[in-house]
Image (spheres, rainbow, N blue to C red):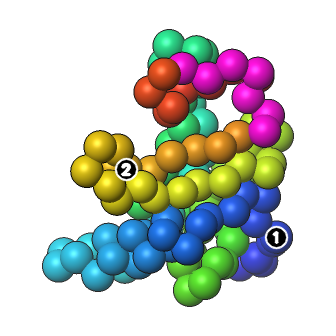
Amino acid sequence: METSTIPVTLTASAIDEIKRLMTVEGFDTRQSLRIGVKGGGCSGMTYVLGFDMASEKDEHFELDGISIIMEKAHGIYLAGMEVDWQGGLNSRGFTFKNPNASTTCGCGTSFAV
């Protein structure tokens, strides 16, 4: 398996939360973190962030001990994107800052290019 340079960045808080999720009892260690996009959402495309099994369409990345997969075709939509984790009381969850998005929705998980 060849590892490429990852086109997205993860903040320190995102890395910490992902590593915490990987230590939850019952976590399938065969899975990698999938970062991608899919059609839908109020702006046309929605971000994908979750654990999944790799497929032949995927590129493989390694970041701070985290195995990451992304479909090759998604790189043009995600190049330069930053994934962050907000753990506050008012906003909790992963956020996406994508320089390729021409518009985003209020929820921050949907965008258009």
Magenta range: 99-105
Secondary element at image label 1: loop
Dividing the image into 4 quarters, which one contains the C terminus?
Answer: top right
In this rendering, the answer to whether 63 lies above or below 106 is: below
Above or below, comparing residue 22 to residue 80 in the picture? below
| Residue at figure coordinates x 58%, y 44% from the top left | 96
Residue 101: % across, % down? 73, 29
Front in this rendered view, residue 92 or 111: 92
Left or right position of 24 against 95: left
Residue 88 higher or lower than 19, as above or below: above
> Where residue 88 sits: x, y (%)?
32, 55
Which residue bears the numbered disc 2?
93
Q: Nearer the viewer, residue 81 or 34?
A: 81
Which residue corresponds to the image point at 39% horizontal and 70% vertical from the top-left? 17
Q: Which residue is mark 1?
A: 5
Disc 1 residue crowd, few under 14, some 14–19, many 20+, Cα 10 Å: few
Work out which residue is located at the far bottom of the displayed protein and give it: 65
